[in-house]
Image (tube, grey):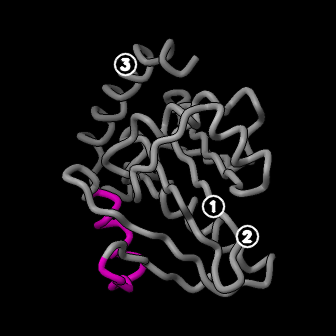
Amino acid sequence: QEDAKRPAFYGQGAARKALRGSSLTFADFIASLELEVRLFSPAPEHLARVAQMTQRTNQFNNTTTRRNEPELWRELGSGELECLAVDVRDRFGEYGLVGVALYSTRTDALWVDSLLMSCRALGRGVEHRLLARLGEIALERGIGRVAVPFVETARNQPVHRFLAEVAGDPQDDGEVSVYELDA
């Protein structure tokens, strides 16, 4: 379904670009978009799109762990992982399901195994809202930290910059860097 909407997304993207060009400031642009961000636990009909995001998202993907739909069904069904999805719309239309966090509860932190965001939603504060919701979930569970591992690839510098911006320097064990945030 998401792929079938792709031509509409491109047309809406052009309208957003024109609005950006006519806005005096970036803040004016964001305000005039009238963004609506919905964070939700995905229903079974969303899992194909969630799996697709793990397969296709490269730039805003903290570990580039790829999962197919049966793997997701197993991991989510067993309670091994939980999922928070994001869909966005603005005055020009729907962006669709553009963000995913696959996470687990550990004794010391809410561990975010996969933090994914489509490029078409980046830079609008959606990634901040997703991370803030993960912090709220951690607090609801009596956990004071959110931990986001990062495995560098040639293409995932956007998520690296974001994590460094919001969390500072990571803890590094030689194999993986972990960005830690107060919930």
| Structural distance between the alpha carbons of marks 1 and 2 | 11 Å
Dot 1 falls on a residue whose secondary structure is strand
The residue mark sitting in front, 1 or 2, is 1
Looking at the rendered structure, which numbered label has been put on residue 163? none
Figure quadrant of the C terminus: bottom right
Q: Are marks 1 and 2 in contact (CB under 8 Å)?
A: yes
Disc 1: CA contacts within 10 A as few (<14), some (14-19) or many (>=20): many
| Structural distance between the alpha carbons of marks 2 and 3 | 36 Å
Q: Which quadrant of the view contains residue 13?
A: top left
Q: Give the left or right position of residue 13, taking residue 85 as reference.
A: left
Q: Position of residue 129 (x, y in %)?
A: 56, 61
Looking at the rendered structure, which numbered label has been put on residue 137? 2
Q: What amino acid is labelled 3 in the image?
A: Gly
Q: Which residue is mark 1?
A: 103
Q: Earlier in the sequence, mark 1 or mark 2?
A: 1
**Residue at left offset 53%, top offset 76%:** 147
The residue mark sitting in front, 2 or 3, is 2
Q: Which residues are magenta?
A: 158-174
**Residue at left offset 47%, top offset 50%:** 116
The residue mark sitting in front, 1 or 3, is 1
- Compared with 104, 90 (above or below) is above
Q: Earlier in the sequence, mark 1 or mark 3?
A: 3
Figure quadrant of the N terminus: top right
Q: Earlier in the sequence, mark 2 or mark 3?
A: 3
Looking at the rendered structure, which numbered label has been put on residue 11? 3
**Residue at left offset 27%, top offset 62%:** 152
Depth order, front residue of 91/129: 129
Residue 89 visible from this viewpoint: no
- Residue 178: in magenta span: no
Q: What amino acid is labelled 1 in the image?
A: Tyr
